[in-house]
Image: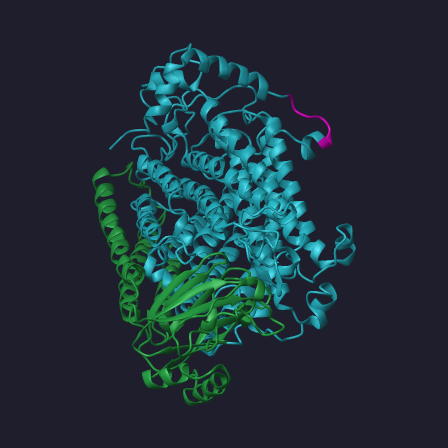
Chain colours: A cyan, B green
Amino acid sequence: MAEVDTAHGGQEVAAHDVAHTEGEVHRHPAPTNFIRKYIFSIDHKVIGIQYLLLALVSVFIGMFMSVLMRLRLTWPEHSWAGLGSIFKLGAPGGVMSPEFYLSLVTMHGTMMVFFVLTTAPQGGFGNYFLPIQIGADDMAFPNLNMLSFWVTLVGFLVLVLAIFAEGSATVAAWFNAKPTGTVGPIGGWTAYPPLSALGFRAGPGQGTGQNLWIISIAIFCVGSLLGALNFITTLLNMRCRGMSLMRMPLTCWAWFTTAVLALLAFPVLLGGGILLLLDRVAETSFFIPGGLVVSDTLLTNHKGGSPILWQHLFWFFGHPEVYIAILPGMGATSHILATFARKPVFGYRAMVFAMFGIGLLGFFVWGHHMFMSGMSPYSGMAFSILTLSIGVPSAIKTFNWLGTLWGGKIRFHTPMLYAIGFVSLFVAGGITGLVLGQTSLDLPMHDTYFVLAHFHLVMGVAAIFGMFAGVAFWFPKMFGRMMSERLGKVHFWITFIGVYCIFVPMHIMGIVGMPRRYAQFTEYEFLKSLHPLVVFVSIAVFVTAASQLIFLFNFLWSMFKGEKAGDNPWEATSLEWAIPSPPPHDNFAGIPPVVYRGPYEYSVPGAPNDFIMQTEPDPTEVQEPSARDAGDARRVTGDGDNGHQH
Amino acid sequence: MGRALAILIWLLTIGSVALFFMGWWFPPSISEYGAQIDSQFLITIIVVGLAFTAAQVGLGYTLWRYRDNQSTERATYSHGNNRLEIIWTVITAIIFIGLAVLGQRVWAQLHFQKAPADAVKIEVVAQQFQWNFHYAGADQKLGQTKPELISDSSLNFIGLDDADPNSKDDSVVSTLIVPVNRKVELMLRSKDVTHDLWVPQLRIKQDAVPGLNIPFPFTATQVGQYEVACAELCGQLHYKMRANMLVLPENEHAELMSLPQAKFQTRMNELLKKYPLALSK
């Protein structure tokens, strides 16, 4: 923070000019026609909802794929009457083929990681609430914001095209190819070459499907990169008067850290993706060594490449990506726990530093995905120590969440239930990183269901609970109506129990040695004892997946029929609760808010209510009338004081 | 609601921990490092289990104890406690980094101890979806291989060069055969895509990467037949890329290895019958 402050102070005049110009750029009149208002909108709130809806569509596609995967794993030879007519090639006679299964694995991972875990928490909630929570009337670059969403949507459409290019004869014909009966490539979301680089020779789905997959991801990288730039600029330049960095809600810190990670990580994946595509279409050899014999054919047009190079590039992006998915959930959880425990966040500064610590260390641990890759064993040792260090800031966050609840007066509304679920699941999923991060324990555990259990709990389910919490918490603000508490609670209970039933047994499968990405487990004697667990997990998946329809129904029904929400239904303190629900086009109706205190002033002794909003004037604080931007306000109020220190 | 949620969290914690006591565990270890890896795993999983339980029990407790009881009393107004913050940070750092350091021991032994000169060298060539193991034969010298000689249709899976005199007595089969209690060094490579050699009982796995030749030393300590799996997604029939590993008494191993190619396969099949795969209950 010291650097930021110094930079600000040192370039006082320039900062003033920039802030002034930005003000002119981002201010735009309310649109009058439907298309500019809801489709090609430059309003950060509409764009946020567009991102959320994109994630909602993707999450149901991804979840449907996981249900098919469990059907195949549990009853591999069974003929599912309906499936044969939907997937004529992938499931002839209703029996799913192994390559069909592997393409489900790939597309489930891609949909979930990119189009759910990256879009909703950051693009969705971040877009909608970051500008409001810092008191800005829009993002710094509204047109760029619109472009980010539309680029992301094109990425999504290309991914859907990959599904049909391998699954439908008509679409395959557009690419002069034959469909292979998959729903995309079969190399997993990690797309390790040479499997992903060798084209159709390496297997079904690896032709057109793999090309479109790479193009889709590359487009997605561009969208995320543009979004990240916008977030960083907005947060640094557009905070309202009095909103010093240390007065920002932790959600804003989370979105900011995430944006920095995205800015540094996505270009690497973009670069890697382009090189992979060149290997495929231009006969370059970045990732393909010489002398390969594939399907009994010696390849003579490649030499000198390194398959491990891709793994380095991919995981240099891939590990920060885990934090891109989870940090906004951490921010939302901190924010919601304080609101419903009616207590200030325990250790606000420690929370900020822990998030930055996680973000920073997140760039130095990618090698723990590669202990078995043939990488130097010395590097493995360094990566192992760094990996377990990242557990420290994660533990700080957990302690502080418990500290926030401790001594509180907890209200159990649905957003709070999801946030508590987040804490529980984050611990359950994160803690097994202590096993996987150790070089010697990764020897038996690598690429087993133990890994699957670990990352699904922590970056999948915990992050999704963060999103559930965000939806339940901010729904009244976004749509002016409350979600049904009753339906929300039913959904929470089933889902919370369900995910434990799905993912805890997967640890056991991993210990026994069950490898990931197997289309069936019938070939190995040592896996047979696990059959009862496989069936149990599948049943838990079906119940949990079905219960997501409750959430969907609640979401859609409440949008139109929910009880009308007031401006501040949760009695919260941050700026979004000081404006109408839903907020007007320019958020603050042309009157920029002024912030007088930190974001978590709950249960202040002697105050009339048990919460004091950030906008409520503080009689002890003298505001200099000429102070215009956040930098000035910070000097007035001292160095970003987060309320009273105790 | 607070109490119900607390109880649910506690029940889920008990259930999760109990599942680790239901008898599903590693298959018995048969390698020199297996016991060390198992004990490091046990230490770690106990730390993990204690931390998991403590956090969940604590979470449940705060929900129970601090639920809104409709009293007029307010929540405690506190922004945190720096001393507590420092204490728990230091404690976790010591435990976590301590575990990381402990976990390096087996890794270092495995990777940094050079295989002795008399180690049994076996070349492993992985391909979609088959393992090929290349044995040196009586002369104990591996014959040369060349990619351009590879031809699956004529059963020269690894491109063994017949012109090389060292090749004459070599055997290439799809079963991994090693002597008991003697250091073996596999040289792993791949013809096409990345594969991974995984024998659960050995507790170790290693990628076979195209373009690289990766040494993989181990000592098997128990005679018998075991399963070799592929643990890195290699394509359509990845789940079927299975082989057998036969750990033989020294004398039977030596006898088999001295056989010419023609008799090797027959004798190997006899031995596979003699030492059958242990069936799971």
Quarter occupied by the C terminus of chain A: top left
Q: Residue at x 36, y 29 (%)?
A: A246
Q: How many labels does the image show?
A: 0
Q: Position of residue A273 (x, y in %)?
A: 57, 44
Q: In terms of image quadrants, where is residue B257?
A: bottom left
Front residue of A168 and A205: A205
Q: Which residue is drawn at 58% across and 33% down?
A: A45
Asked whether residue A231 appears in the rendered view, the answer is yes
Query: Against A603, is B31 above or below?
Result: below
Q: Where is residue B34 in the image (x, y as percent from the top left)?
A: 31, 70
Q: Which secondary structure dominates the residues rendered in magenta?
A: loop
Q: Where is residue B134 in the image (x, y as percent from the top left)?
A: 46, 72
Q: Where is residue A214 in the image (x, y as percent from the top left)?
A: 61, 47
Image check: A405 left or right of A516?
Answer: left
Does residue A30 show up magenta in the picture?
yes
Front residue of B133 and B195: B133
Query: Against B221, is B231 above or below?
Result: above
Query: Against B46, is A138 above or below?
Result: above
Asked whether residue A513 appears in the rendered view, the answer is no
Does residue A517 show up magenta in the picture?
no
Quarter occupied by the N terminus of chain A: top left
User: Which residues are the magenta region?
Assistant: A29-35
Image check: A329 left or right of B155?
Answer: left
Q: Which residue is drawn at 42% across and 49% down?
A: A412
Front residue of A622 and A140: A140
Image check: A390 left or right of A136?
Answer: left
